[in-house]
Amino acid sequence: MLRSFAIATALTVASLSPAFAQTTSAAPIMVENAWARATPGNIKTGGAYMTLKDMGTSPDQLVGVSTPVADKAELHIMTEDNGVMKMRPVAAIPVEPGKPTELKPGGYHVMLMGLKNPLKEGDSFPMTLTFEKAGTIQVTVKVEKPGAMAPMPGMKPGMKM
């Protein structure tokens, strides 16, 4: 009986290994300093920021994002056009090997829409990033004070893949 269980377990693991290999063969992405600004009162939108590093040899791109704290999360960019700041959604954010991609206020960022509760300073929440090649990465986003322009000094890097 024990031997049959061991064989069945080994066969199950062996059958899963090709799928596992496919998800780990892509360029590794490192996510550092994932943070968001606290939101006051009944504000239903927020932003999340981080640094993405492609530690592999081929480019990748961030193509999606989700989090349970908001009804919707989108990739956005803020640009200046003749002195006017404009924000718009983007389909993807490029991540090049050896060149950090910063998601920061005034540039690329994650727009959180339909916040279910205010984001409170000192709290954190989960976020799933989806990359074209690297697949999904789970990160923890730390909530900083309202109006913050960067994560707190000494903040530890986020999750790695």
Image (spheres, rainbow, N blue to C red):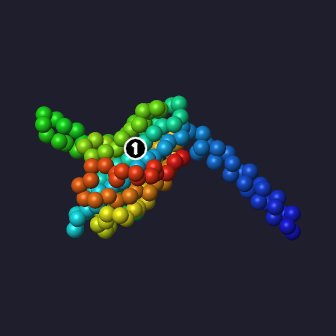
- Horizontal placement of 57 versus 102: left or right? right
Looking at this view, is 37 or 151 the one in front?
A: 151
**Picture residue at 27% right of the left edge, 53% below the top:** 148
Q: Amino acid at mark 1?
A: Thr
Q: Image quarter for residue 125?
A: bottom left
Label 1 secondary element? strand
Looking at this view, is 157 or 116 the one in front?
A: 157
- Horizontal placement of 149 versus 141: left or right? left
In this rendering, the answer to whether 159 lies above or below 83 is below
In this rendering, the answer to whether 98 lies above or below 17 is above
Q: Position of residue 156 (x, y in %)?
A: 44, 52
- Horizontal placement of 159 versus 148: left or right? right
Q: Is residue 9 visible?
A: yes
Q: Position of residue 98 (x, y in %)?
A: 46, 32
**Picture residue at 81% right of the left edge, 64% below the top:** 5
Q: Quadrant of the N terminus?
A: bottom right
Residue denoted by label 1: 51
Q: Position of residue 115 (x, y in %)?
A: 30, 63
**Picture residue at 13% right of the left edge, 40% below the top:** 84
Q: Estimate how packed mark 1 is, as few (under 14), some (14 to 19) or many (20 or more) residues with alpha carbons within 10 Å.
A: some
Q: Is residue 74 visible?
A: no
